[in-house]
Image (cartoon, helix red, strand yellow):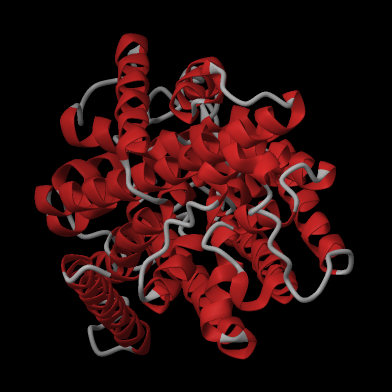
Amino acid sequence: SSYATTPRESSMLAFAEFKVASFQLGSEIPFQPLEWPGELQPRGPGSIMMPGTIFEGKTSFGMSVFNLGNAIMGSGILGLAYAMANTGVVLFLLLLTVVAVLSSYSIHLLLKSSGIVGIRAYEQLGYRAFGTPGKMAAGIAITLQNIGAMSSYLYIVKYEFPLVIQAFLKVDVEWYLNGNYLVIIVSVTVILPLALMKQLGYLGYTSGFSLSCMVFFLVSVIYKKFNLPCPFVDFAHNSTVSVLNVTVNDPGGEDNPTAYTIPILAFAFVCHPEVLPIYTELRNPTKKKMQHVSNISIAVMYVMYFLAALFGYLTFYNEVEAELLHTYSRIDPYDTLILCVRVAVLTAVTLTVPIVLFPVRRAIQQMIFPNKTFYWPRHIAIAITLLTFINLLVIFAPNILGIFGVIGATSAPCLIFIFPAVFYIRIVPKEEEPLRSVPKILAACFAGIGFLFMIMSLSFIIIDWTSGSSKASSGH
């Protein structure tokens, strides 16, 4: 504090010294959650930085909403009409509401834990709560979850992009109609340059454009509800579209689709790995401000999800497929509006991949290079390695429903329910909230819901797989 020249600088230095000392010694933090007050935000070259924490945020409130909304929104919206077909409208709305509310509460737990220890990295919260095993568990869950998400986005590129090119160019067999080639081209030319950016906040503009594409998708689904013939008339038997049918008639479904309904819903709201990085880069960050960002993002996505599912379901009822746009293609593969929607969805999911890649890279760095500062070659190498692995996964993955189901049943409950709750219980001091206090009891129940959800979902999926394989072996 001897270097301070004003009371403001003195208080900043004292606050910084205390927080760094507390972090290094692992001592118990006093009762009140500690955050940098808005007027004490360090700025400039002398900003205080701790492992997993950056205190100088530059991203505006609106851009943060766009980034988090884009992290929530993704390929999940294409599977929700299928989920509604398996649950009915009322049960779907109930489940969607429950998952949205629980996601918001989960973010509250993350932000409360983060504020107490001054850490804004999911993996470092795990380290603070349970040491190295906690950090590794969080890092692995984030990596699996986001690799699953990115795979599902690129899976859409693989199966939708060829249809779009074929419909626009009216060609049958060309090398550029191979979805595997197109995934690689899109990854190299669009995703990789965006993924190489140093900060997540820079992607706010692409996130805003991505969300506008999904709004166009939603408006088109509502419009089509009132402009398609009823009952459903399958157009795919027409010989003139035989080439398209290879993709159109690949629903990738399972024998018991109900087993996948709840995991698909859970998968649709997972944005938790992105919450703390976005919080880090928020201008003048406070828990209350970041909670507002989260609540607005979740509310907007909730409305869009429900409307897309409802009108997609009311258009096709039980004929709807696991990937909604495939169902439109069965009516008319050359419908101009649906082709434009395909382009919009392709754009949206492509621009979402870099947002989702940031937390994975951060998790890998926390697990493998925990004490290293930013280094461009490493930053670039991790991005290239991740995209290469995900491209290989997409090229050889069986179907999109399997990705939704398995990831939604394992990593999703860990990141939404279990980790935020157990980190909160461990990190919030007993002096402030005893183990038998209402907030910690609620957090424990929340973790219990996560374990129950995981066990039930995995059980359904395993039963579904085993019954499917037994049917296949018996000749069905």
The picture quadrant where one finds residue 434 is bottom left
Closer to the camera in the image, 389 or 71 = 389
Could you say where residue 344 lies in the image, as x and y percent from the top left?
A: 72, 40
Residue in the image at 66% along x and 49% along y: 65
Could you say where residue 77 lies in the image, as x and y percent from the top left?
A: 60, 59
Q: Is residue 285 visible?
A: no
Residue in the image at 43% along x and 41% along y: 150
Quarter placement of the N terminus? top left
Relative to 65, 71 lies left or right: left
Q: Residue furthest top?
A: 377
Residue in the image at 66% along x and 44% along y: 239
Closer to the camera in the image, 269 or 121 = 269
- Location of residue 424 with respect to 138 vertically, above or below: below
Quarter placement of the C terminus? bottom left
Could you say where residue 299 lies in the image, as x and y percent from the top left?
A: 67, 67
The picture quadrant where one finds residue 436 is bottom left
Q: Residue furthest front?
A: 239
Relative to 337, 239 lies left or right: left
Could you say where residue 282 lies in the image, as x and y percent from the top left?
A: 59, 42
Closer to the camera in the image, 340 or 307 = 340
Instruction: Please state the total of marks drawn on the protein image.
Output: 0
Relative to 49, 326 lies left or right: right
Q: Is residue 226 visible?
A: yes
- Location of residue 314 with respect to 336 vertically, above or below: below
Residue in the image at 76% along x and 28% along y: 168
- Location of residue 18 with respect to 31 vertically, above or below: above
